[in-house]
Amino acid sequence: MNRRTFLLTPLAMAVAQTLPVSAFAQPKPRNLKWVPQADLALLDPIFTTAQVTQNHAQLVFDTLYGLDEKLEPHPQMAEGHTVSDDKLIWTIKLRDGLKFHDDTPVRAADVVASIKRWGDRDLMGHSLMNVTKSIEVVDDRTLRITLTETFPLILHALGRQTTNMAAIMPERLAKAPSNQAIKEMVGSGPFRFVASKWISGSKVVYERFEGYVPRQADTPASFGASPKVAHVPGVEWNIIPDAATAIAALQAGEVDGVERINNDFLGMLKEMPDIHLVKIALPGINIMRFNQLFPPFNNADIRRAVLSVVNQTEYMTAANGSSFPEYWNDKCGVFVPGCPMDSRAGMEKLTGKRDIAAAKAAIKKAGYNNERVVLLDPVDFPSHHASALVTADLFKKLGFNVDLQAVDWGTAVQRRNSQASPQEGGWSVAFTGLSGMNNLDPAGHLALRGNGKAAWFGWPDSPKLEELRNQWFKAPDVETQKKICAQIQEQVFIDVPYIPLGATYQVSAVRKQWKNFEPYMPIFYNLRPV
């Protein structure tokens, strides 16, 4: 009797009745294993703008509101809100039963402290705090925000999905100064950070928080407005800096996804039937950021000379290769290409003739005195490493005294916050990316602030940029906003707080046994096995 015949006999049926239910149960759900874009060097999403930290924060923390795929806000931790007729008093009530990972209840006092800490650090938070008279506790589930003038984007600000998200944490942690990174991770999100299993440079582990209660779905699931349902018992981040090793692990089934795919591997992965490639919906913008506190880049004439010879095509092909040009854009200005605020104003400064000899002469005329130029080269972050190498070659042609310093990405993220001189462990030029969602307009654009030492790293002082940004917030309509954004772009090419090096569509690779991967950013709630 063969196996097939036996399974049809009464004896087989009798045997089956004696077996435990587990004998026929589905395999036990397993952790999702993921290769993030870089090592998680800093945990605090308020302290740093590093995207890998913000991705980490999406697992651990929750926000009052979340943005859908059209970037419209919907309640998350909030049950709802009321607004006074003059739009100056916003009263927000929390959902019942919210808990932190230490099993303490989420109170309005925690939310108030968290908003204040976030508002002291975040770009959009700063703008909100500038028109905020008070943030106060009404009762344990209710808080009140009183404004001095209307701020139509208040819910968008409180629901930011990227840098810096308005992460809600216990009051005892939120009372820490915003310029000091907290190390204890206690949020109220769908997953909790397992500190005992964190191995820096190797592995990060998250476990499903059984005390999390997703909000009820009153709107279709859409990006950050979706109920946050953890369908897996945990998420493991495996830190694999080498791109080829990460791809090999994906092929072997040792990991389920790789966040950032080097274009060198796209052709191979497209031929693999069990791998799904996800083109992230909005491109990020790679940038060269100047330290304006010290020579030589405290001199705008020298910054403009560098701008005049940057070739975006060279940077994009170095970072992405030339085989898949559909994944990059080498005609990129200040805002995300193709978005409503994108402009061609002043683009001749980036696309005109590149004259190395003229730029070198301009640098000498501007008073360059052979100061050492320290370039931070994050060798474990392929696209920024490529930017550093292209820049080092360009700067040598321009006559700069180049010191290309190889560092890992975590070190680069920490070191770029240092205001020490380049000779004392500081830096001259750093490379980073601006996420697409943050660069649709001036509201969340980190690199556009010109408020000196209160600005993003590099600390540009540009009163005109600040004035234009404030005008944008007060613009009566979209057409006026577009005109102001054109002026902002022209001013960027005058003050040169940074140089856009091109826009790149990040491509992630996920094994096809998983579904519901968001094409906006890697968030792991709602992701489930097929």
Image (cartoon, rainbow, N blue to C red):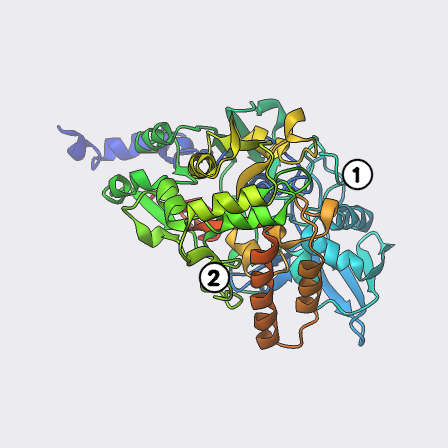
The residue identified by callout 2 is 347
| Badge 2 amino acid | Met
Q: Nearer the viewer, mark 1 or mark 2?
A: 2
Seen at 81% across and 40% down, the residue is 175
Q: Is residue 10 left or right of residue 215?
A: left
Residue 481 percent across, percent down from the top left: 61, 71
Determine crowd level at label 2: few under 14, some 14-19, many 20+ residues with C-alpha closer than 10 A.
some
Residue highlighted by disc 1: 177
Q: Nearer the viewer, residue 353 or 21?
A: 353
Question: How far apart in space, not on screen, are marks 1 and 2 (Cα)?
Answer: 40 Å
Whether residue 426 is visible here, answered yes or no, is: yes
Q: Is residue 452 above or below residue 336?
A: above
Residue positioned 52% across, 56% down in the render: 223
**Looking at the image, which is closer to me, 526 or 11?**
526
Q: What residue is at 81 percent from the left and 57 percent from the top?
A: 143
Q: How many marks?
A: 2
